């Protein structure tokens, strides 16, 4: 079952060791971390399984969520710095 991790979903995947060694080797050859390689492989697979319009809509929604997350962090930092400047806790 997927868990929330900020704006992302956290899933655990168990792989057999010999095949994971192959993933590690491919990732190393590509200069990537294994998790990044697996994430990209899943996204590529989704692109094959779903209509292009659906994938593009999902990418736009994910980008909008990311931008909102960045804005929330900026606003939070600005509020904290104003409190420190005024001597509030």
Image (cartoon, helix red, strand yellow):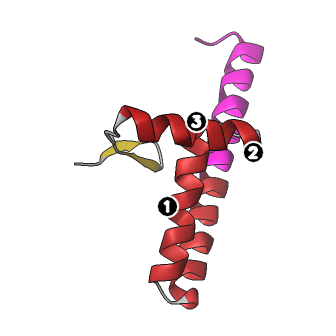
Q: Kindly report the secondary structure that dominates the magenta region of the rendered protein.
A: helix
Residue drawn at the location 34% of the way across and 44% of the way down = 11
Q: Is residue 41 above or below residue 1?
A: below
The reply to whether callout 2 and callout 3 are in contact (CB within 8 Å) is no
Q: Secondary structure at mark 1?
A: helix
Name the residue tied to disc 3.
24
Q: Which residue is mark 2?
A: 30
Question: How many dots with numbers?
Answer: 3
SS at badge 3:
helix
Rendered view: 51 above or below 48: below
Whether the magenta-drawn stretch holds residue 85 is answered as yes
**Residue 80 spot, x, y in % from top left:** 66, 24
Residue 54 screen position, x and y as percent: 51, 85
Question: Does the magenta-highlighted stretch encompass residue 21?
Answer: no
Mark 2 or mark 3, earlier in chain:
3
Q: Looking at the rendering, in which quadrant would you find the C terminus?
A: top right
* Distance Cα–Cα, label 2 vs label 3: 10 Å
Q: Which mark is residue 42?
A: 1
Residue 53: name its quadrant. bottom right
What residue range appears in magenta? 69-89
In whole angstroms, how far apart are the C-alphas of marks 1 and 3? 16 Å
View extreme (front): residue: 18
Q: Earlier in the sequence, mark 1 or mark 2?
A: 2
* Mark 2 secondary-structure assignment: helix
Q: Quadrant of residue 65?
A: bottom right
Structural distance between the alpha carbons of marks 1 and 2: 16 Å
């Amino acid at each position: 079952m997927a868990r929330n991790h900020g704006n992302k979903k956290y899933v655990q995947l168990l792989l057999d060791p010999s095949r994971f060694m192959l993933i590690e080797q491919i990732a190393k050859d590509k200069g990537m971390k294994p998790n990044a390689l697996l994430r990209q492989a899943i996204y590529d697979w989704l692109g094959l399984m779903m209509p292009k319009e659906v994938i593009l809509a999902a990418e736009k929604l994910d980008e909008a969520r990311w931008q909102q997350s960045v804005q929330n962090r900026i606003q939070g930092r600005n509020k904290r710095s104003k409190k420190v400047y005024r001597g509030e806790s």
